[in-house]
Amino acid sequence: MDWSGKTVVLGVSGGIAAYKAAALTSSLRQQGADVHVVMTRNAAEFVTPLTFQTLSQNRVVLEMFDDKAEWDIDHIVLADRVDVVIIAPATANIIGKIAAGIADDSLSTLVMSTRAPILIAPSMNVHMYENPIVQSNIAKLREHGYHLVEPAEGMLACGYEGKGRLAEPEDIIARAAEIVGM
């Protein structure tokens, strides 16, 4: 697949599946995409921003307010020029924030600021995924035009087995390509 000329924001929230987001970043780059990673603070506990900076060849956005020589508002600049936003892994926390319209970090603020299509790739413990509140939040996002790639079933990092594994990077990329009309 040729992603040349396309800008992708990869939102990484704080779950163990954040390590798969590194492979997703690498694959999108290899296919020609300009990938910009926006991480939550919790995501940085699982995978360092330096990993994503190296793989994407772009500065990683972690903090809402960053002291840097060149001042711009990252979440607004990226929100305006992105072709698709992919949130992988999307934890119950970020799904809940988005569904409630909460914008209190770089990722949730970018989501509220963009007009680009947004693909949510949930990843969490099976019991969290099945929780009626999480399911209600997912349904609400779908009603508002957000796209989803279903989590896979299998052994989860917590030791449980069931639905909640992050979809494979190639499945996420294929779904994102459908969304942008590739």
Image: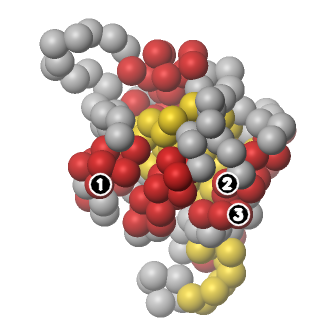
Contact between labelled residues 3 and 2, with CB atoms less than 8 Å apart: yes
Which residue corresponds to the image point at 37% horizontal and 14% vertical from the top-left? 73
Q: Secondary structure at mark 3?
A: helix
Looking at numbered disc 3 in the image, what kind of residue is underneath it?
Asp
Q: Which mark is residue 51?
A: 1
Count of marks overlaid on the render: 3
Q: Secondary structure at mark 1?
A: helix
Label 3 crowd bin: few (<14), some (14–19), many (20+), radius 10 Å: some
Above or below residue 105? Residue 138 is: below
Q: Is 101 left or right of 103, judged from the image as shown?
A: right
Q: Quadrant of residue 152?
A: bottom right
Looking at numbered disc 2 in the image, what kind of residue is underneath it?
Ile
Residue 102 x/y as whole percent: 52, 30
Please name the residue that numbered disc 3 is placed on. 171
Residue 103 x/y as whole percent: 48, 28
Above or below residue 103? Residue 180 is: below
Extreme top residue here? 71
